[in-house]
Image (tube, grey):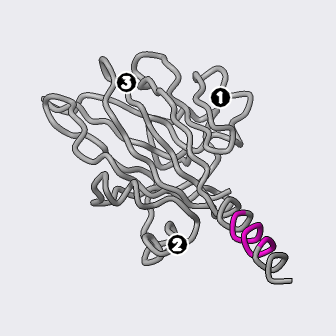
Amino acid sequence: MKKIISAISCITISVCSTAQNLKTFTLSVQPNISNGKSYISIEKQNVFSENEAAAIKESIDFLYAAYISGIDTVKEFTNMSIKSEAVPKSLQGTQSAIVAISWDIDLWNKCRTTADLKRMTGYMTNNSFSYHAEMASNHTGEINYPFFIFQTSNGKRGIIYVQKEPGNGIKITIKKES
């Protein structure tokens, strides 16, 4: 009897811990100025060009926008609402939200499960988020703010880690609730 209870406990623990893991995936994103794949769909775990995004606009969460402001290169995530001039009218729609956070790579690595995400970001309310968040605003275009929390239109949350790629490209690693 003791062996049966032990086996059931082990199975329960492994099923519960697997079910709570955050879904993690990585995407390479090119900025809108290069007519690259700059439209990010967290649901579809993919990036799309403007033409591709038009066919699935209800699934697009963010646009990776890059532009020059004075002598600075600005790189940002912006949602698909009417608040951003970077979003074409034909693609406006979803209201996913985002905010930059002051994490380091150790905190990022420690956030592995839904419970971790809730514990580490639970202080954020819906009012904490915005329609856009800057990752860079400097003359070199280097990433100043590599960590973000997002909330999709359906209320699911997750985190993003940004790394620079050649040119103005970025690699984003996303961890999200299932």
Q: Is residue 166 left or right of residue 58?
A: left
Residues shaded magenta: 7-14
The kind of residue on which mark 3 rests is Gly
The kind of residue on which mark 2 rests is Lys
Queried whether the magenta region covers residue 138, the answer comes back as no
Q: Earlier in the sequence, mark 2 or mark 3?
A: 2
Q: CA distance from mark 2 to mark 3?
A: 30 Å
Query: Residue beneath label 3, please?
Result: 169
Q: Is residue 25 left or right of residue 14?
A: left
Q: Residue 22: x and y, percent? A: 59, 56
Query: Residue beneath label 1, please?
Result: 53
Give me the residue at 34% from left, 60% from top. 107
Q: CA distance from mark 3 to mark 1?
A: 18 Å
Query: Residue beneath label 2, please?
Result: 118
The kind of residue on which mark 1 rests is Ala
Give me the residue at 27% from left, 48% from top. 145
SS at badge 2? helix
